[in-house]
Amino acid sequence: EVQLVQSGAEVKKPGESLKISCKASGYSFAIYWLGWVRQVPGKGLEWMGTIYPGDSETRYSPSFQGQVTISADKSISTAYLQWSSLTASDTAMYYCARHGDPNYYYYMDVWGKGTTVTVSS
Amino acid sequence: QTVVTQEPSLSVSPGGTVTLTCGLSSGSVSTSYYPSWYQQTPGQAPRTLIYSTNTRSSGVPDRFSGSILGNKAALSITGAQADDESDYYCVLYMGSGIWVFGEGTKLTVL
């Protein structure tokens, strides 16, 4: 069974750093693009960026470029989303999602359950 | 910056048909944007419904269908059921490894 298992909820203070994870199983992790999606409480979904774990090629939404870093470790089938200095506006649910088919990656077909990040002083 | 537009809210009667649309603030949506559709109920992760304009994802009932209507992508739900009451999002592939979500449509079944 194809699965994406995300790390647990985080509560952080402004200015702290954070790295959340998304562990894949049931498929060849390296050859499928994997994306991150943000959902601020009460708001819609926003595509943040996507990584190809095979060579770590990464694409970012202009809205998130420079604000977060997406990485992957194909040896343990895990992707990461990290912040160097959190602000209250980073409070949200974060989903990882696999892009469908290595040769047809234009959509997302498998979703993690999400990681809640709360940033508060 | 390109905005992907959706109706903020729609309603449908049980058993009825409703069409949700996905447009661009500037320009027309075509199959070249590979439109996909996702359903999200409160407190849950999104679920993939439709990709490549009109291909249903595995396990999605044929009550859900996708198309291009005029200059927009469209998701139609026929024979609406109570558990179709959800938020629906479209995604367009803008090229160069960039995806954009629509603003979402809140569908009420009443």
Image: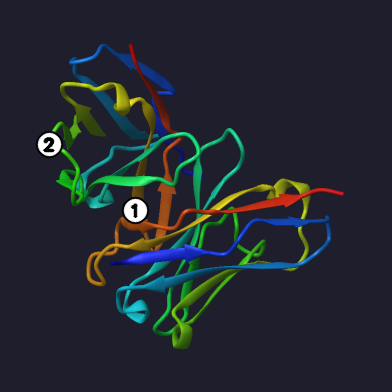
- The residue that appears at 16% across and 35% down in the rendered structure is B65
Q: Which residue is mark 1?
A: B93
Q: Are marks 2 and 1 in contact (CB under 8 Å)?
A: no
Task: State the image quarter where residue B15 is shown.
Answer: top left
The residue nearer to you, when weighing A6 against A31, is: A6
Q: What is the chain letter for disc 2?
A: B
In this view, the residue farthest toward the bottom is A75
Residue B49 picture location, percent across and down:
26, 43
In whole angstroms, how far apart are the C-alphas of marks 2 and 1? 24 Å
Is residue A44 something that shows in the picture?
yes
User: Few, some or many C-alpha atoms within 10 Å of disc 2 (few <14, some 14-19, many ≥20)?
Assistant: few
- The residue that appears at 29% across and 64% down in the rendered structure is A105
Q: Which residue is mark 2?
A: B62
Kindly state the secondary structure of the residue where label 1 is placed: strand
Q: Which residue type does callout 1 highlight?
A: Tyr
Question: Quick one: quadrant of the C terminus of chain B?
Answer: top left
Is residue B71 something that shows in the picture?
no
Q: How is the image coloured?
A: rainbow
Residue B62 picture location, percent across and down:
12, 36
Compared with residue B29, is residue A68 higher up or lower down, i.e. above or below?
below
Nearer the camera: disc 2 or disc 1:
2
User: Few, some or many C-alpha atoms within 10 Å of disc 1 (few <14, some 14-19, many ≥20)?
Assistant: some
Kindly state the secondary structure of the residue where label 2 is placed: loop
Q: What is the chain letter for disc 1?
A: B
The residue nearer to you, when weighing A63 against B106, is: B106
Q: Earlier in the sequence, mark 2 or mark 1?
A: 2
Compared with residue A37, is residue A65 higher up or lower down, i.e. above or below?
below
Residue A77 picture location, percent across and down:
44, 79
Q: Which residue type does callout 2 highlight?
A: Asp
